Image (cartoon, rainbow, N blue to C red):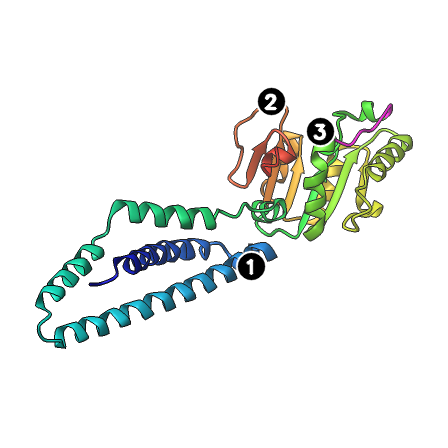
Amino acid sequence: MADTSKEQPLHLIKRLGSYITIKFSNLFSISLHSMDPRSIGAVAGLAVAVFFTWRLLRSPSGSQRRQRKRQAATPGTSGVNTQSNASLISSGVCSPSDDNRAQDVVDEFFQPVKPTLGQIVRQKLSEGRKVTCCLLGVILEESSPEELQKQATVRSSVLEVLLEITKFCDLYLMERVLDDESEKRVLAALEDAGVFTSGGLVKDKVLFCSTENGRSSFVRQLEPDWHIDTNPEIVSQLARFIKYQLHVYTFRTERTAANVFNASSLEQFFGSI
């Protein structure tokens, strides 16, 4: 009589094999250049799992064929053969419980890999290599040059995103100020927040001007892939010169152009809050 206790794991392995194949194809739909070492390790582990599943599927099926041939060649065992064949047929039927168990095992092992903030930033910026960004209302809590004459405060919630941008982008920060003291306050606030310690941003890339038009001129001279600003007029003026822009608004506005995106904050645009 065929050992059905050995055949049941075989069918479970077959279910696992089919689900693993699906997971494998879904995982490779992610672009390789956006994977971190942990994701690449998951792919390697998945490949090993598929290989051993394939080996397990080949071995039992071959032994079963040999066993059936031996049983067919042995005379006087028709009753045993009949019972054995019935067991093989019944064991070949796919039961819902087998499918559910296989799916549960695979789903538990291959949990979706959550993308890192760095991967999200690169994806959102479409691999742009140069970014310009105004300070007021985006990096700083203050929203006007007059406020900078009293204080400058870096928004803590934006720091993580800002540092990720500096890791792979050439970032320039710029703002309109009314006096030299305001410049010093801004630079001191950025330094205290640790913006310059990562190595991606230096003080020379923090630019100051006395007019809003001066900021537009900075952007056009630098020719960034992305510009981030709170002033809708500047965003509108630069729309035909800059590839992409992000308008950080105080009050929600309509999208003015196909290459202009809207968000309530820099961190909200990258989904970190």
* 121 or 227: nearer the viewer: 121
Q: Residue at x 72, y 44 (%)?
A: 163
Q: Inspect the image, locate mark 3, and give the three-letter code of the amino acid beneath it.
A: Gly
Residue of label 1: 41
Q: Position of residue 117 (x, y in %)?
A: 62, 44
Give the extent of the magenta segment: 149-155
Of the 4 image quadrants, the one containing the N terminus is bottom left
Decide which of tag 3 and tag 2 comes sooner along the chain. 3
In the figure, 178 relative to 218: above or below? above
Amino acid, disc 2: Phe
What crowding class fits label 3: few (fewer than 14 Cα within 10 Å), some (14-19), or many (20 or more)? many
Q: Is residue 69 left or right of residue 131?
A: left
Q: Give the spatial CA distance, label 1 vs label 2.
A: 44 Å
Among the two numbered marks 3 and 1 on one chain, the one whose residue lies closer to the N terminus? 1
Q: Is residue 36 visible?
A: no
Residue with the most extreme right position: 181
Distance between the Cα atoms at labels 3 and 1?
Answer: 40 Å
Residue 263 colored magenta? no
Tell me the residue that label 2 is attached to. Answer: 251
**Which label belongs to residue 137?**
3
Is there any visible trace of residue 194 in the rendered image?
yes
Disc 2 crowd rating (10 Å Cα; few below 14, some 14-19, many 20+) is few
Residue with the most extreme front position: 76
Q: Residue at x 89, y 35 (%)?
A: 184
Q: Is residue 215 above or below residue 67?
A: above
- Observer-side mark, 1 or 2, equals 1
Q: Position of residue 264 (x, y in %)?
A: 61, 29
Callout 3: SS: loop
Residue 2 lies, with reference to residue 226, above or below; the image says below
Where is residue 59, by image quadrant?
Answer: bottom left
Chief secondary structure of the magenta portion = loop
